[in-house]
Image (spheres, grey):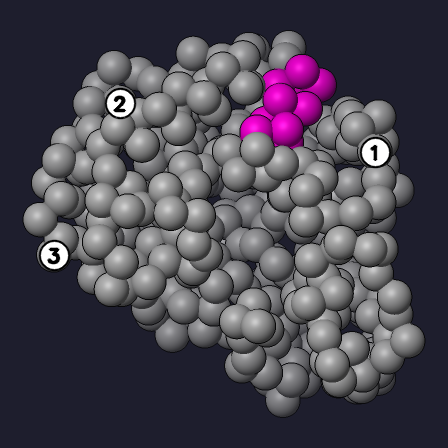
């Protein structure tokens, strides 16, 4: 497993991390806690050292699973855990017109942090992130008090490093806050389809520096080739909404077009998707969701083949696709 620095945090992490949204259950259907624990242990065995979760994932269930399954690794510092403070109003993404008091007031910041510490069974969070953000909040009268709370939690050692989880497909909404030295990491959607972070965020990361955590490398499954026009999701699974209407057919059509690029260099679409993300030197780690040990092994093997050649990257240029299916 190759490693990369996580911006200025001082951490060196595996370039393939594990995104733990699915481990919390809730909006995701299928899988089980026992299988999730097996996936976490498989990840450690395969050399993964970065795990991203959130207080909102299953109302803390994802955090509790990680805390229990990886207790010795967390206590020894062999793995780095990143989690997130949910917006107080429960609205994703963060909207410019929402008062900061409804999203991240000081008391909500501190109580959420304390709950995450308890769930994970630790005394300090290696990386704590705002789960949504909009730079419009920097002008909110409440920002001074909320910022002071961030500083206090870091001074007390409860949060070691602060980061921002950027709104879906909108890296431009966090460029101002990320220029502040207090914020050392940025989690962002980046994949073969969505190249928007390349426009300004990656340039900021090269000059600041900034640890870039890439989420949604598979576009919620569309970039794995596993989404077909006939795909049926388990009842209650949020992907039924994400891939509603004719979106599954569109995902299948675009997936087939990408499959036409596969050759001796790249054997599968998941490998193509992961290696694309890892081809950017701005990226610190990529965090696909992995709920099963088999997924862990497959993704570790794919990522291990390294960056794509310039020729393959050039062929992917024509597959850019700006969309936002999270908006309903």
Q: Residue 151: give x, y in percent of width and height.
A: 19, 28
User: Magenta stretch?
Assistant: 60-70
- The verdict on residue 9 being magenta is no
Image position of 91 with respect to 262: above or below: above
The residue nearer to you, when weighing 241 against 63, is: 241
Residue topped by disc 3: 139
The residue nearer to you, when weighing 14 against 307, is: 14
Q: Is residue 311 visible?
A: no
Q: Residue 200: give x, y in percent of width and height.
A: 33, 70
- The verdict on residue 63 being magenta is yes
How many angstroms separate mark 3 from mark 1 (CA)? 44 Å
Q: Which SS class for mark 1? A: loop
Q: Quadrant of the N terminus?
A: top right
Q: Earlier in the sequence, mark 3 or mark 1?
A: 1
The residue nearer to you, when weighing 153 against 112, is: 112
The residue nearer to you, when weighing 55 against 264, is: 55
Q: Residue 162: give x, y in percent of width and height.
A: 33, 36
How many angstroms separate mark 2 from mark 1 (CA)? 34 Å
Instruction: Identify the residue shown where x is 83% and y is 33%.
Output: 32
Image position of 238 with respect to 46: above or below: below
Q: Is residue 84 visible?
A: yes
Residue topped by disc 1: 32
Q: Residue 191: give x, y in percent of width and height.
A: 60, 67
> Which mark identifies residue 153?
2
Q: Main secondary structure of the magenta part?
A: helix
């Amino acid at each position: 497993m190759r490693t990369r620095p996580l911006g200025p945090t001082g951490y060196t992490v595996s370039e393939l991390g594990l995104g733990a949204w699915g481990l919390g259950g809730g909006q995701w259907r299928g899988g089980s806690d026992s299988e999730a624990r097996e996936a976490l242990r498989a990840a450690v065995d395969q050399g993964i050292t970065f795990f991203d979760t959130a207080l909102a994932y299953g109302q803390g269930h994802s955090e509790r699973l990680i805390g229990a399954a990886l207790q010795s690794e967390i206590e020894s510092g062999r793995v780095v855990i990143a989690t997130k403070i949910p917006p107080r109003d429960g609205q994703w993404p963060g909207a410019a017109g929402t008062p900061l008091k409804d999203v991240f007031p000081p008391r909500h910041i501190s109580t959420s942090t304390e709950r995450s510490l308890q769930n994970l069974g630790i005394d300090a969070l290696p990386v704590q992130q705002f789960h949504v953000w909009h730079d419009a909040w920097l002008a909110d009268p409440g920002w001074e008090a909320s910022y002071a709370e961030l500083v206090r939690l870091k001074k007390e050692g409860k949060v070691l490093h602060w980061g921002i989880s950027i709104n879906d497909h909108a890296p431009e909404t966090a460029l101002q806050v990320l220029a502040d030295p207090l914020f050392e990491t940025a989690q962002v959607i980046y994949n073969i389809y969505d190249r928007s972070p390349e426009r300004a965020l990656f340039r900021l990361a090269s000059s600041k520096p900034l640890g870039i955590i890439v989420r949604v490398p598979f576009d919620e499954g569309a970039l794995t080739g596993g989404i077909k026009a006939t795909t049926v999701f388990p009842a209650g699974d949020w992907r039924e909404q994400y891939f509603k209407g004719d979106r599954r057919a569109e995902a299948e059509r675009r997936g087939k077009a990408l499959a036409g690029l596969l050759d001796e260099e790249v054997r599968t679409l998941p490998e193509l998707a992961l290696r694309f993300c890892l081809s950017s030197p701005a990226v610190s780690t990529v965090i696909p969701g992995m709920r099963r040990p088999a997924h862990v092994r497959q993704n570790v093997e794919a990522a291990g083949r390294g960056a794509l050649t310039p020729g393959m990257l050039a062929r992917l240029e024509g597959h850019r696709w700006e969309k936002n299916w999270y908006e309903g």
